[in-house]
Amino acid sequence: MKKFTFLLIFLLPIIGYTQQNLLQDSPLEYAWKNVGNAGFSSWEVGYTSLAFSPSGQPYVAFSDREYAWDETVMKFDGTNWVIVGIAGFSAGYTNFTSLTFSPSGQPYVAYQDGVNSGKATVMKFDGTNWVIVGIAGFSAGYTSYTSLTFSPSGQPYVAYQDGGNSGKATVMKFDGANWVYIGTAGFSIDNALYTCLAFSPSGQSYVAYEDWGDSLKATVMKFDGTNWVNVGNAGFSGGRALFTSLAFSPSGQPYVAYKDYVNSKKATVMRFNGTNWENVGIAGFSGDNANSISLVFSPLGEPYVAYSDGSNSNKATVMKFDGTNWVNVGTAGFSIDGAGDTSLAFSPSDGQPYVAYMDVGNDSKATVMKFDSVFAGINELQESRLLLYPNPAIDRITLETSLTQTHSTISIMNINGQQLITCPITESKTQIDISNLPSGVYFVRLTNDRTVEVGKFVKQ
């Protein structure tokens, strides 16, 4: 694997927020704007997947009609969207694209591989070429709903609906030489659709899916080191659940967003409180039909969902939970026309939400928009007083701030938002042991009853 070179620029950006309600409105508060040109791909796209590099560049992977639906990845260089490697780099057509970054900063994509009987393939960009990770078509049979992420130890994991095991859920990881099963292949009771994989802050793998073994309701399972076991009750949603999207809160609670058939096909989010699954806010909080739902937590720990909004001509809408209610982020239905395959991510550079989608208003090409505001919800951007050194670090990082108060907490997260270290801060200068973290880029969040500050460092 090519070693990533990092500069001292990783001392920046460091972002500070003062938590205070804004009494005034700002035109920027509601501004969704295009990142580069709208419809920047050469032709129609499918299965758009958005992720940020450790340096803060947005990347989008998609199935590219210009190249007979082969896979293409593009990145925004600050001015234009440019091809990463070559366009249409896969051997044949792709479906169910999932894009993420390794801890060392390499982009990886997983997909259903059309030239390998619809089996799963993962490729990575080595700085020059897209190369296969392990072997192409490593799954036992066809795959659907591929979901790719990295474990805290730095290994790529893929969850999918497994045609080689009666359409049930399977998870595999690449151990450096081969793709191997995590637990039993086909561990769900029956067909598992919309499989979504995430790791808890403690490092356990979880999968959410639409469970055909339980009336098409939502089920979440986790791997306990030996077996896949249910998290709470199987089929915990009130009715059928489509577009299941799984994410962890900074405190380690699993959240699932889905299209809720018991609530007029609107969006619902539920979380596991340690005993039961409970609604976050009200069930069915969106205006109407919600499709292509994508759930992510902001740097401040708030759950956000992006979706194709049936109450606004299937345009893109983003909402967040403010602790009491689900509220629109900017204007509902902010895209110029219908938005398919919505994919939501937060920029590590400015902390703002970005959405990638198939843009009906631009000939179904790819578009990315960001919420361009100097206000992050109710939090006003302020000059930071957080210092991290040495950077890069080897086994210890020192955090220094002049804003330390009682009840301050420090959290260290990887680039996938997984919280790996948390501890109280009682002094202005604190040294933290990071020797057990794998090499890569990490984010630091300092919170107390008045401020939230975010920094970034590199572990060598």
Image (cartoon, helix red, strand yellow):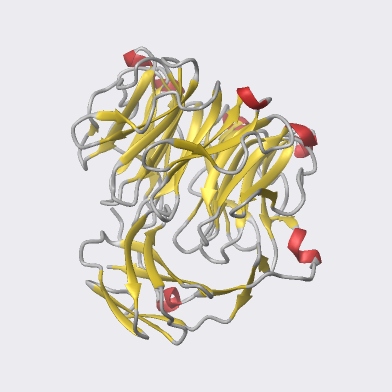
Residue placed most toward the observer, 454 or 164:
454
Can residue 317 be spotted in the picture?
A: yes
Picture layout, residue 324 above or below residue 173: below
Residue at position x 37%, y 86% in the image = 428
Residue 282 sits in quarter:
top right
Residue at position x 70%, y 62% in the image = 372
Residue placed most toward the observer, 241 or 280:
280
Picture layout, residue 153 above or below residue 159: below
Q: Position of residue 17 (x, y in %)?
A: 57, 73
Picture layout, residue 300 above or below residue 188: below
| View extreme (top): residue | 166
| View extreme (front): residue | 275
Residue at position x 68%, y 25% in the image = 264
Viewport quadrant of the C terminus:
bottom left
Q: Is residue 34 shown left or right of residue 88? A: right
Q: Position of residue 86 (x, y in %)?
A: 50, 44
Q: Position of residue 307 (x, y in %)?
A: 65, 38
Residue 415 sits in quarter:
bottom left
Q: Position of residue 185 (x, y in %)?
A: 27, 22
Residue placed most toward the observer, 430 or 103:
430
Q: Is residue 272 shown left or right of residue 311? A: left
Can residue 83 be spotted in the picture?
A: no
The mark tally for this picture is: 0
